[in-house]
Image (tube, grey):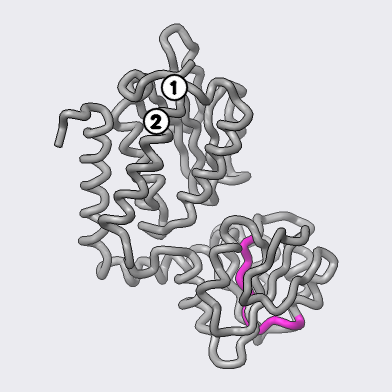
Amino acid sequence: MRLNLPAALAHLRVWHRGGGGSAIVAWDARPGLQVHTCQRSLHVSVDLPGSAAGAQDGADVLRGLPAYEFLLQFATGLKSAVAGETNVFGQLLAAWRAYANRADEAQALAPVMDRLIRDAREVRARYLQGIGGQSYATLARRLLAPGPGARVLVAGYGELGRSMPGKFSRTDLAVFNRTPPASLPAEALRYFAADEARAAAAWATHVVFCLPRDADIDATWTGALRDRPEVRVVHLGLRRGARGPWNTLSHVHDLDDLFDLQRSQAQLRSAQLEQARAACATFAARAVSPAVH
């Protein structure tokens, strides 16, 4: 059932919890948009009168205006550890498109998502353009600091991996992916297939991992990199407290190293981010009460 925006917002409900990915317990089977990132998981729905609210162990719940403001801060990257980053917006869009294409119940949520996408783009355009270190790709480049003659391998070519090539355009670039990408960036010299991990590791001087943690992948790549301590590596799916076999490699940066770099630059961006957070509150109020200016 398609609702108007005020009605949809009145019944909006967001469950959320940190951790993300495989660290969370599975959501229940109730209808709703699910978004999972490496830092946070969300379940978003419009709960109409008479519907069962359900429960999610360990999750925080927001409703109505606070729920919409939270979603807007999430969509603009203001809830991310790298505040203001852009990758999460792409993840949200992909999750929404997949859900909207297959679920009749998405009609109730559609007015909220249409407004959210529009508001998120406007907040970014007004307050977050040109913000330093706004993407994982920018921070990964600064952490790796590839010099002349560097050969950069992007391992994993999903949403996050596709954001990398433009930031490494002055290096030799290659892509490793388990399945052939539909298209390679103009910067890429070559593609390494799933069974070419060792060849890819031997080619690279710098590696950006955009792959999830997986026992088989971890074993393959830690083995391939163990004898190449000169290769600089940043793994964007690896957390400091759960490195597993990657602890055997001293030349691998994890996601927390990237966050440390981001925090060192945070003071330069704090005023800009506060303006964006304030704008999210204003935009949320306008969505609920269009007469608010």
Q: Residue at x 53, y 79 (%)?
A: 144
Q: Tell me the CA gap for discs 1 and 2.
A: 9 Å
What is the x, y in percent for residue 287? 27, 32
Q: Which residues are magenta?
A: 202-210
Q: Are marks 1 and 2 in contact (CB under 8 Å)?
A: yes
The residue to which callout 1 is attached is 46
Label 2: how many Cα within 10 Å (few below 14, some 14–19, many 20+): many
The residue to which callout 2 is attached is 112
Q: Quadrant of residue 160?
A: bottom right
Compared with 1, 211 (above or below) is below
Q: Amino acid at mark 1?
A: Val
Looking at the rendered image, the quarter that the C terminus falls into is top left
Q: For the residues carrying marks 1 and 2, which lies nearer the camera in this image?
A: 2
Q: Residue at x 77, y 58 (%)?
A: 179
Q: Is residue 103 left or right of residue 89?
A: right
Q: Which numbered disc, 1 or 2, marks the residue that appears first in the sequence? A: 1
Regarding residue 224, the answer to whether it shows in the image is yes
Foreground: 177 or 24? 177
Label 1: how many Cα within 10 Å (few below 14, some 14–19, many 20+): many
Q: Specify whether residue 104 is painted magenta.
A: no
Q: Secondary structure at mark 1?
A: strand
